[in-house]
Structure formats: structure tokens, C-alpha cells
Image (cartoon, rainbow, N blue to C red):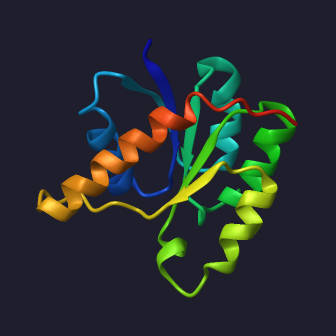
Amino acid sequence: MTIRVLIVEDSVIFQTVLKNILSTSPDIEVVGIARDGIEGLALIPQLDPDVICTDFHMPKMGGLEFTKQVMINYPRPILVISVSVQTDQRHRIFELLEAGAVDIFPKPRGSVDPESQINHLKLINKIKILAGVKVFR
């Protein structure tokens, strides 16, 4: 069974990086990309993703409000992928988890060095695990 993933990310560059990383796994299909939480919410009923990967900082509707709205309207596993987990904004992690995010992952680099490749595999494995998580309101 293929894991259907929706990417919600405002950076076109990182949309591409994330899609390229996930496309290396035959078990994962990126079914859609949204530029912010508003677009992401509109795509969920159409695409019915198994897992949502979202950024934290986005225009219009950021990751925190997006996570809250997903949990109210379309509960499913959310992985927040953000540089906030690597900075002094780590307190945001608890807000995201309280809102319903299942896990947080640092934004991977698009490079091919060994450390990046290991992180890419960790991201793919995390999404595979999250696809089996049952989320409810």
C-alpha cells in the first residue's frame, strides 16, 4: 500500500527538496502540494492524504493554526518539518504537539553528503511510521 502524503510548505525550493526526498521511496507518493494552511485545508478532502507534512512558519495560515484545523475537521497524522526545531524557538514544539501534530522533524538539506542522506532516510522512515498512527479528535 502506498502512503499518500500532502506537503504544506510556502518555500518552492523546499517543496521540491521534500518531494525529491520522498520520491526516493517506492512506498510514498506525494499526492499534493499547498503553499499555506488555507490551501492545505482545501486539498485534504480532495486528496485524502494518509500523512501531512507541514512547515511551521507560512503566510496566511501557519502550521500551528493549520494543525488545529486539521485535527478538528480531518484528523490524520501531521509531521511538522521546520527550522524552528533547530533554533531558539523550541518552545513551539510543545504548542504544535498540543495542537495535534504527531511529531516534529528538522528541515532536511537537499545535499547528497552522507549526513544528509541519513537524515533523508530518517524522514522517510518517520513518515512510514506515522502512516500507521490512528489520530482522532
* Drawn side of residue 23 relative to residue 6, left or right: left
* Drawn side of residue 111 relative to residue 56, left or right: left
Q: Is residue 134 above or below residue 53?
A: above
What residue is drawn where x is 35% and y is 22%? 27
Which one is in front, 131 or 33? 131
Quarter of the figure with the N terminus: top left
From the top left corner, tell me how far across and down residue 9 is, in percent.
50, 52
What residue is drawn where x is 50% and y is 55%? 10
Q: Is residue 92 above or below residue 121?
A: below
What residue is drawn where x is 13% and y is 60%? 114
- The residue furthest bottom is 88
Quarter of the figure with the C terminus: top right
From the top left corner, tell me how far across and down residue 41 is, in percent.
70, 37
From the top left corner, tell me how far across and down residue 43 is, in percent.
63, 29
- The residue furthest left is 113
Which one is in front, 121 or 36? 121
* Drawn side of residue 70 relative to residue 20, left or right: right
